Amino acid sequence: MRIDIVVDDGFDGLDALGPLEVLRSAAELGADLSARLVDRTGRAAVTGGHGTQVGVDGVFDPAVVVVAGGGWMARRDAGAWGEVQRGDWLPLLRAAAGGAR
């Protein structure tokens, strides 16, 4: 099973890197899964809300999905809040859910 962890500029580091580390550790111990950091466009890297830069492993492709937060409480343009306001992710997540509303 592949698990995609969605990150965009402004992501919350703990929301993305904590699950990534846990899932990759489980895979190293024999769990039948892989975890990767993805975005919508295939950029090489993204910058978290506090300046942490991480490489992106690929472009979002419907799988099991974890969406890293960020910017929600402060209503910042960068992070999950800004992405929701722009609406770019919603169609992709709907498609991944089989068109569910």
Image (cartoon, grey):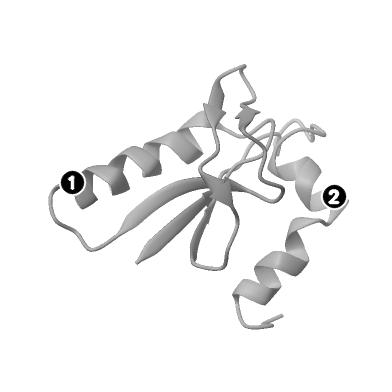
The foreground one among 54 and 90 is 54
Q: Identify whether 16 is placed above or below 99.
A: above
The foreground one among 19 and 2 is 2
Which kind of residue does numbered mark 2 sit on? Answer: Gln
Rendering quarter of residue 34 = bottom left
Q: Label 2 crowding class (10 Å Cα cut-off): few <14, some 14-19, many 20+?
A: few
The foreground one among 4 and 12 is 4
Q: Identify whether 100 is placed above or below 6.
A: below
Q: Identify whether 89 is placed above or below 13.
A: below
Point out residue 28 in the picture as x, y percentages from the top left corner. Answer: 18, 46
Rendering quarter of residue 18 = top left
2 or 1: mark nearer the eye: 1
Which kind of residue does numbered mark 1 sit on? Answer: Glu
Q: Identify the residue at horizontal 67%, vertical 38% (top origin).
A: 43
Which label belongs to residue 28? Answer: 1
Q: Identify the residue at horizontal 32%, vertical 38% (top origin).
A: 21
